[in-house]
Image (tube, grey):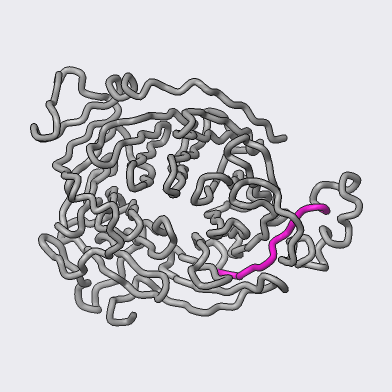
Amino acid sequence: MTTVSSSSPWPNLDSTSASDSDSTFPSHHRDRGDDTTESLDSFSSMSLHSEEVNQSSDRIPDSNRNLNIQTHTSPSTTPPPSLLHLSFNQDHACFAVGTDRGFRILNCDPFREIFRRDFDRGGGVAVVEMLFRCNILALVGGGPDPQYPPNKVMIWDDHQSRCIGELSFRSDVRSVRLRRDRIIVVLEQKIFVYNFVDLKLMHQIETISNPKGLCAVSQGAGSMVLVCPGLQKGQVRIEHYATKRTKFIMAHDSRIACFALTQDGQLLATASSKGTLVRIFNTVDGTLRQEVRRGADRAEIYSLAFSTNAEWLAVSSDKGTVHVFGLKVNSGGSLMKDTPRIASTVTRPTSPSSSLSLFKGVLPKYFSSEWSVAQFRLVEGTQYIVAFGHQKNTVVILGMDGSFYRCQYDPVNGGEMSQLEYHNCLKPPSVF
């Protein structure tokens, strides 16, 4: 059963900042203050100038800049690096790869490696978070020989090929999210929200144990919407910063395994550890707008992704199949009227949802479920993440084995997707 609760009081950001975080900057930014009040949870230091964060830039960093790092791999006799991290940038035009030697940035369409940074010593990078296509990245060390401590977020400026700031914490960083105006750092049981320019702590949130670092933020031009696990199993917390309201949704009976936001923050898709159902909620009022079924058996959901116009939802899991579902809600969260676009209940005429839909409410819920429009089969057991491509009716799939797929689905007839491209992002640049 899905229940919704809302709380309107908004935490005092000034008192939150003072009690839980202390930032240190050069004197031309601000004074240090009393050293005896140093935070037990987080600490930040930065020599960041506003012009260094090129927030309006859409340039990819210069691949020839090379101070204390190597931009190319060693001779071909060197074994390929181990992959530690994969993530798309905010508009899914690029993706970042973290390895046990450094990190790489690749373009999705056309597929090509844009640049790589392989460090001389150590080099393990477990988190690489891009900021659209600009020169600023957030890095967290990881792997057997981390380049940076796993409890620090390093702000990397690739125009200077160096770190220009850092955030330190008492425990390991699980993930990082970036907006043009905010840095969000996720620990296992706490989330910190910082102002990007000066690293001032703006907000902190306590969560249930969150080892995956689940967190999603809107990327629209308006005020930020942030989603994270709540303090109860199966609960999600939604922060609306424009209205200073916090909403809690009991999305599932079991723990939250994955969720995704639309770019404008209006719709939220969630999946639980059971992995059979995906639910779509309106983030403003917390109402359940649609429910789709991935399958009948348990699965670990690896990723969820909305299309740009929120007409489609893609899902990847450990079962080795990527599903695309048709959505009946628009990006504003309201139900769409019937359109010529095919509905998910008629794309698979042999499924129980088509032949037994008249018995909804009498037969078990399984038989009236909405199934996926299109599917693509992959190697079972490999972890994949998915996003919608910039080409019409395409999805891009990234695998932790280094695989890159571009596939196309038929929005009218559905069925098996066709593979358009395959590459391996761990191969040397000369292969691309």
Residue that appears at 59% across and 64% down: 322
Q: Is residue 369 magenta?
A: yes
Q: Quadrant of residue 82?
A: bottom left
User: Percent from the top left, x then y, of residue 400?
Assistant: 43, 62
> How many callouts does the rendering have?
0
Is 356 located above or below residue 256 in the figure? below
User: Percent from the top left, x then y, of residue 236?
Assistant: 55, 36
Q: Quadrant of residue 21?
A: top left
Please give the range of residues in magenta.
367-378
Most foreground residue, 324 or 143? 324
Can residue 398 be seen here? The reply is: yes
Q: Quadrant of the C terminus?
A: bottom left
Q: Is residue 230 magenta?
A: no
Residue that appears at 38% across and 37% down: 187
- Horizontal side of 160 relative to 39 (left or right) equals left
- Horizontal side of 241 relative to 370 (left or right) equals left
Can residue 212 be seen here? The reply is: no
Residue that appears at 53% across and 59% down: 308
- Horizontal side of 42 relative to 388 (left or right) equals left
Residue that appears at 44% across and 28% down: 206
Most foreground residue, 28 or 291? 28
User: Percent from the top left, x then y, of residue 264?
Assistant: 50, 48
Is 406 located above or below residue 305 in the figure? below
Q: Quadrant of the N terminus?
A: top right
Most distant residue in the left direction:
27
Most foreground residue, 341 or 378? 341
- Horizontal side of 151 relative to 5 (left or right) equals left
